[in-house]
Amino acid sequence: MRGQKRFAWLMATPTIIALIALGIVPLGWMIWTAFQSFPPNPANPPQFIGMRNFVDLADDPQFFGSLRTTAIVLVFSLSLQLVLGFLLALALYSIERGRGLIVSLLLIPTAIAPIVAGIVWWMLFNARFGAINSFLVQFFGIDPVNWTIEMPTALIAIIVAVVWQWTPFVAIILLGGLTTIPRDVLDAARIDGASGWRVLRYIIVPLMRPFFLVVGLLMIIEIVRLYELPFFITQGGPGNETVVAGVYLFKLAFSFFDLGRASMMSVFLVIALSLVAALYMRLVADRRMTVN
């Protein structure tokens, strides 16, 4: 028994060391930095200022503006991702031959680097030579739209790009959930005369709730930390209307060189996401207890 425990600890040691080096140490440094003020001269040491960075953030209208913009992108993107992802998962579930190839092709947008995706979508939405404006002009006679430099089209462009990149991932997760539903249950419901809508509403959707919650949590984390897509599509414009939390955090750290406030904002986002994750996990646990 002791030999097995030693072997288990030996196998787990590299993972524990990597977790401490790559996770806990940077997190601790970020928390320490959040309570410091860094002078313009790097030769001078930082000074402890307590919660002043948090107070400065609370007095910064652009901080709340970035949170508001992030919330708008989150609500619309997440809603579209879940709806479109579920419809796509249902379509894939009905396919028996060639499903693996289709799934592999669908994952291409998710595998593309966000920087590349942001540049591509900026080119597509470009008012002068973008393919989207060319399509609208040629087939619908609509005048060119300044997608990336006017509101609300700039925000719509970001939402479209986010939905395009992550909806296939949502669909794959939900497809995995659909495969866990016993076909006997679905066949029995149909034999009893239940319509396709009733099977979907009263059997499939309730059993899929844990998968919706999990993939929703993953997408919330992904959208909150958005940086590359909105930055390369709109550069935060027009003005600061499309500055999401990730873009503002980047500006604080590398444009304003305010590492203290940037770290404090990072701590705030970590705490907020942790609370959301805890709420999601509790909902999942309660649902499993109800189902059991």
Image (spheres, helix red, strand yellow):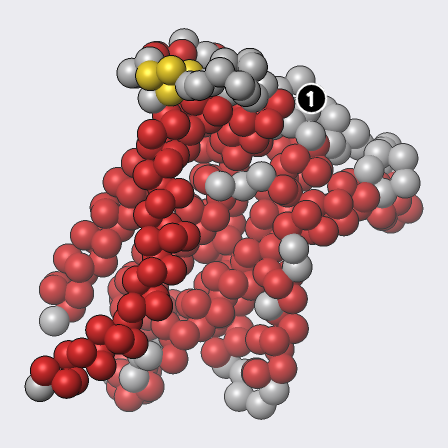
Mark 1 is surrounded, within 10 Å at the Cα level, by few (under 14), some (14 to 19) or many (20 or more) other residues, namely some
Query: In the image, is residue 272 above or below residue 63?
Result: below
Residue sticking out furthest to the front: 43
Query: Which quadrant of the figure contains the C terminus?
Result: bottom left
Query: In the image, is residue 76 above or below residue 58?
Result: below
Residue sticking out furthest to the top: 59
Quadrant of the rendered structure where residue 48 is? Answer: top left
Q: In this view, does 196 lie to the left or right of 80?
A: left
**Percent x, y of residue 171:** 49, 65
Q: In this view, does 139 lie to the left or right of 158?
A: right
Q: In this view, does 119 lie to the left or right of 20?
A: right
Type of the residue with mark 1: Pro
**Percent x, y of residue 290:** 12, 63
Residue sticking out furthest to the left: 1
Query: In the image, is residue 67 above or below residue 82?
Result: above
Query: In the image, is residue 21 above or below residue 123?
Result: below
**Percent x, y of residue 103:** 58, 75
* Residue at image coords 75%, 33%: 147
Task: Please tell me which residue lies in front, 205 or 109.
Answer: 109
Dot 1: what SS?
loop
* Residue at image coords 84%, 34%: 127
Total tally of numbered discs in the picture: 1
* Residue at image coords 56%, 31%: 250
Task: Please tell me which residue lies in front, 45 or 27.
Answer: 45
Quadrant of the rendered structure where residue 178 is? Answer: bottom left
On the question of residue 57 being in view, the answer is no
Query: Which quadrant of the figure contains the N terminus?
Result: bottom left
Residue beneath disc 1: 238
Task: Please tell me which residue lies in front, 49 or 213.
Answer: 49
